[in-house]
Image (spheres, rainbow, N blue to C red):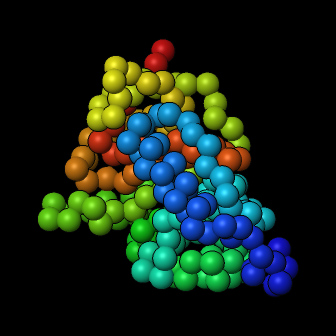
Amino acid sequence: MTQTNIYTGGFADPAVASAHGFRAAMDVMARPGEIREITGAVAPEGLSIAAASLILTLCDPETGIYLASDVDSTALRGWITFHTGAPIVPAAEADFAVGGWEALMPIDQYRIGTSEYPDRSATLVVELAEFAAPNVTLTGPGIKDTVRMNLPDVALMQRNSMLYPLGVDLFFTCGSEVAALPRSTQIQAEG
């Protein structure tokens, strides 16, 4: 991405696209494991359409973003600053963290909230190459019976859910699709 590309992209129709993006983000967070389309963003190099749409929808000048090493670049930092005003912060201060699974680790570097303010935790936006075959069964709030999903590190996600009401929430993005795993979801490994 060149310097001039920092100013391009974003939402073509910000009011409509951000409303659709917010609805998609809330729908997947309310229905863990379901995959939905989230579009509207012209994504910068290094981010999927879904991740860019989440950033444009959920981040503002008071929302700290951590960029993992696999997506971090001067151009992406400029794009985020121009389109959202969100500051780029260290992992320990992040409201949102964006990147591939391995680059986002270790998970214990992110805020998990406090007993007084459990909502003061980080949300990870995990970029995936694909939504792989399911390896877990999910139950809990927002799930009628069960839902199957693939998670990159089942044991780690089970430990995160055991912290509830503390812990991190996760969005998983691939291309223009998004799924979510709130910390309240119970996870059972398959096989």
Q: Is residue 63 visible?
A: yes
Q: In the figure, is residue 161 to the left or right of 89?
A: left
Q: Residue at x 75, y 80 (%)?
A: 6
Q: In the figure, is residue 165 to the left or right of 74?
A: left
Residue 60's place in the image compared with 167, above or below, is: below
Q: Quadrant of residue 117?
A: bottom left
Please state the total of marks drawn on the protein image.
Answer: 0
Q: Position of residue 159 (x, y in %)?
A: 33, 41
Q: Residue at x 71, y 47 (%)?
A: 175
**Which of the pair 5/157 is nearer the observer?**
5
Q: From the image, which quarter does the N terminus lie in?
A: bottom right
Residue 150's place in the image compared with 82, above or below, is: above
Q: Is residue 105 visible?
A: no
Residue 11's place in the image compared with 158, above or below, is: below
Q: Position of residue 141 (x, y in %)?
A: 29, 35
Q: In the figure, is residue 45 to the left or right of 68?
A: right
Q: Residue at x 61, y 25 (%)?
A: 133
**Which of the pair 70/180 is nearer the observer?**
180
Q: Position of residue 161 (x, y in %)?
A: 31, 42
- The outermost residue toward the left is 116
Q: Residue at x 57, y 40 (%)?
A: 36
Q: Position of residue 140 (x, y in %)?
A: 29, 31
- The outermost residue toward the top is 191
